Image (tube, rainbow, N blue to C red):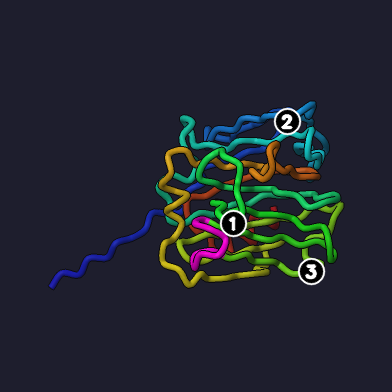
Amino acid sequence: MLKLTVLRSPVALIFDLDFTGDTLNIIGGKGQATAYTVGSGTVGYTDGRNGGRAMNFPNSRTNYNYIEARATGGGPLLAGLDEFTVAFWVYPITNDSWWFSATTNTSQWQYPNENYIALIWWSGDGGRFQTERFLYNRYDANSFSLSTGNNTVPANQWSHVAMVTTATTSVIYINGVQRAEQTTSGTSGISALTSSPSAICYIGRANWETNGISAGGRLANFQVYDGSLTPQRIAELAAE
């Protein structure tokens, strides 16, 4: 009997953003990015890593900037995916910061029925990153929060952060080293997010409160892949 093996396509880079030339520089046409401001916030750039440029985020609840990340052509960035990887360089300063969130629509989140996956830097206890995965409601079997632990991402220095998300599992890497992993007991996966035609990805924003919540610090080299990067590949990104 002939046995067929189905091979998964290699993981592809679908969003590749840096700030060369003090602008939103989409590399190789991979993705679409638009900067917005809230209140009297402004879009500003500053020194990045290794002589590059970074976007500055002021960490203000009323006056700040953020980015909407979309697929090439303007559709939802994560549409149709059952797994993905987010990777970026960040220089956090003070106060808790929402560096990435993917949500089902642009509406304000309502506790405990919020719908999002997010990466948040918490400033206390020496600095750490946390993934919040609340795609149906905060207490659903498919939901959890996951932390890298204290003193893993200090303020005022560059760190590489990567989050691998599958239908059931989230893994966080800091500077190429796995720091946290958790698997949900639910079976609904991430389809609530990836099947929504109004889904949106934010960089530097969360849809809490009327004006949202922002990030504070510098951001460089933000990438999204359409599958799970290997630990080896994440370590390579962190070494660049």
Q: Which range of residues does the magenta coloring cover?
A: 135-143
Q: Name the residue under label 3.
A: 150
Viewer-proximal residue among 12 and 191: 191
* Residue type of the residue flagged with mark 3: Asn
| Mark 1 in CB contact with mark 2 (< 8 angstroms) | no
Q: Does the magenta stretch include residue 137?
A: yes
Viewer-proximal residue among 11 and 156: 156
1 or 2: tag closer to the N-terminus: 2
Viewer-proximal residue among 105 and 219: 105
Q: Residue at x 62, y 30 (%)?
A: 34
Closer to the camera: disc 1 or disc 2?
A: 1
Q: In this view, does 8 lie to the left or right of 228?
A: left
Q: Is residue 93 left or right of residue 100?
A: right
Q: Is residue 177 above or below residue 239?
A: below
* Residue type of the residue flagged with mark 2: Val
Q: Mark 1 points at which residue?
A: 112
2 or 3: tag closer to the N-terminus: 2
Q: How crowded is mark 1: few (under 14 residues within 10 Å), some or many (20 or more)?
A: few
| Mark 1 in CB contact with mark 3 (< 8 angstroms) | no
Q: In which quarter of the image is residue 119?
A: bottom right
Q: Is mark 3 on a helix, strand or loop?
A: loop
Q: Is residue 120 left or right of residue 218?
A: left
Report the label total: 3
Q: Which mark is residue 38?
A: 2
1 or 3: tag closer to the N-terminus: 1
Q: Is mark 1 on a helix, strand or loop?
A: loop
Q: Which residue is drawn at 57% across and 39% down?
A: 107
